[in-house]
């Protein structure tokens, strides 16, 4: 395997709705972002090579480009837990927590255990803590992704869960804003939604909800009198119809689960959610976040990334970024920053 010269850095953030590719002056800040390209989601990782060549230039045969890659596999596993301080580093105990509390399959998974407040990696040599976040997923998913990336000429110098990188970035953004209220952060996928409650002091809640965009399709079909769910899905993603009016009906299932999670959090902590930020949703679905915020009685977060980028030493070359940084770029930028938790997957020790 021959790696390309490290004079430039490359970052790829891949999720089910879009892929962003960036060329930077280096892989670690301080750095200059020289170009950002968006790749249509329907091309997937397998179709990224031609677009990557537009950013990086022609690739020599057999060469690989060092790249930091952020991924969001459907079966990603991010859960907050409280550990027994006397057993927090026992492999058998950690696997027991995964299997019994979260119905996970630790024998098939790779995962890291991070401190819930600061993202430090729990290891046999570190003091550790009782409040942690399990981060990882299924080994076969990571292996398949790595093989796909290599086939595209991309060598993943780091392969991270974008969700975890964003949690670290959001924590610092909230600290810079001097925010005192817990923030509800949602990743709304096709099949499921990942729900997080985060503040400047760490992650307070992390859980998946088995309702995503697809659960809204049959409701949209009924509401609009369409012939089948396929027609409803096409209209939902067409960006030609305003779903604001029927939004409350479309989100009923998701909203019920969110209210349950928020209620549990508020009872346990005595704190109330102050704002909502959707870090992942389809393009053209602005009605979705506004509908959820209204139904939950919270504000939509105004995300100003410029102070955070300045703190990180991350700058844009002239003409690369619009005046207002696009919201979806936060996922890509979080991979560049120093403040995200460590997310390298490994078996629990």
Image (cartoon, rainbow, N blue to C red):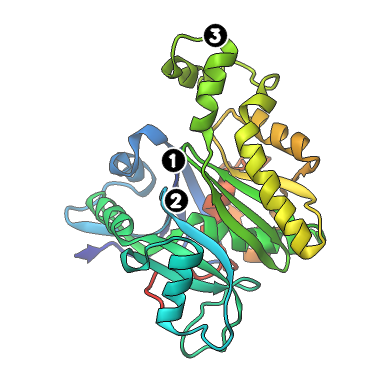
Residue 74 or 83: which is nearer the viewer? 83
Residues under labels 3 and 1: Cα distance?
Answer: 28 Å
Within 10 Å of the Cα at label 2, are there few (<14), some (14-19), or many (20+) other Cα atoms?
Answer: some
Res. 344 visible in picture: no
Label 2: which secondary element: loop
Residue in the image at 52% along x and 31% along y: 215
- Residue tagged by mark 2? 72
Q: Residue 138: give x, y in percent of width and height.
A: 35, 59
CB atoms of marks 1 and 2 within 8 Å: yes
Would you place residue 217 above or below residue 344 in this image? above
Residue 283 to residue 62: above or below: above
Residue placed furthest toward the front: 100
Indicate which disc residue 16 carries: 1
Q: CA distance from mark 1 to mark 2?
A: 8 Å
Q: CA distance from mark 2 to mark 3?
A: 34 Å
Residue pictured at 33% horizontal, 58% vertical: 142
Q: Name the disc covering residue 117, or none.
A: none
Q: Earlier in the sequence, mark 3 or mark 1?
A: 1
Q: Position of residue 258 (x, y in %)?
A: 66, 45
* Residue found 59% across the figure and 85% down from its top: 85
Whether residue 128 sits left or right of residue 16 in the image: it is right
Quarter of the N terminus within the rendering: bottom left
The secondary element bearing badge 3 is classed as: loop
Query: Residue at (51%, 19%) from the top-left corner?
Result: 238
- Label 1 CA crowd tier, 10 Å (few <14, some 14–19, many 20+): some
Q: Secondary structure at mark 1?
A: loop
Counting every numbered tag in the picture gives 3
């Amino acid at each position: 395997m021959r790696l390309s010269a490290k004079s430039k850095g490359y970052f790829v953030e891949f999720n089910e709705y879009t892929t962003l590719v960036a060329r930077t002056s280096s892989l670690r800040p301080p750095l200059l972002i020289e170009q950002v390209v968006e790749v249509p989601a329907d091309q997937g990782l397998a179709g990224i090579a031609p677009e990557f060549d537009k950013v990086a230039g022609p690739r020599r045969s057999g060469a690989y480009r060092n790249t930091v890659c952020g991924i969001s596999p459907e079966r990603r596993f991010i859960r907050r837990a409280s550990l027994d301080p006397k057993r927090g580093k026992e492999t058998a105990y950690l696997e027991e927590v995964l299997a019994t509390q979260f119905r996970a399959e630790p024998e098939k998974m790779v995962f890291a255990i991070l401190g819930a407040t600061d993202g430090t990696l729990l290891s046999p040599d570190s003091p550790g803590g009782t409040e942690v976040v399990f981060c990882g997923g299924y080994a076969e998913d990571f292996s398949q992704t790595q093989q796909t990336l290599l086939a595209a000429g991309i060598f993943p110098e780091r392969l991270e869960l974008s969700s975890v990188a964003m949690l670290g970035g959001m924590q610092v953004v909230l600290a810079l804003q001097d925010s005192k209220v817990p923030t509800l952060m949602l990743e709304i996928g096709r099949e499921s939604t990942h729900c997080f409650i985060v503040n400047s002091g760490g992650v307070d809640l992390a859980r998946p909800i088995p309702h995503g965009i697809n659960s809204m399709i049959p409701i949209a079909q009924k509401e609009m009198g369409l012939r089948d769910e396929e027609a409803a899905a096409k209209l939902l993603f067409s960006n030609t119809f305003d779903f604001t009016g029927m939004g409350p009906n479309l989100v009923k299932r998701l909203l019920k689960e969110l209210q349950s999670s928020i209620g549990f959090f508020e009872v346990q902590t005595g704190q109330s959610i102050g704002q909502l930020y959707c870090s992942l949703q389809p393009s053209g679905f602005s009605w979705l976040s506004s509908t959820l915020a209204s139904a939950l009685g919270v504000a939509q977060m105004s995300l100003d990334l410029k102070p955070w980028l300045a703190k990180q030493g991350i700058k844009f070359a002239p003409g690369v970024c619009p005046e207002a940084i696009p919201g979806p770029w936060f996922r890509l930028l979080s991979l560049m920053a120093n403040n995200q938790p460590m997310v390298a997957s490994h078996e629990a020790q």
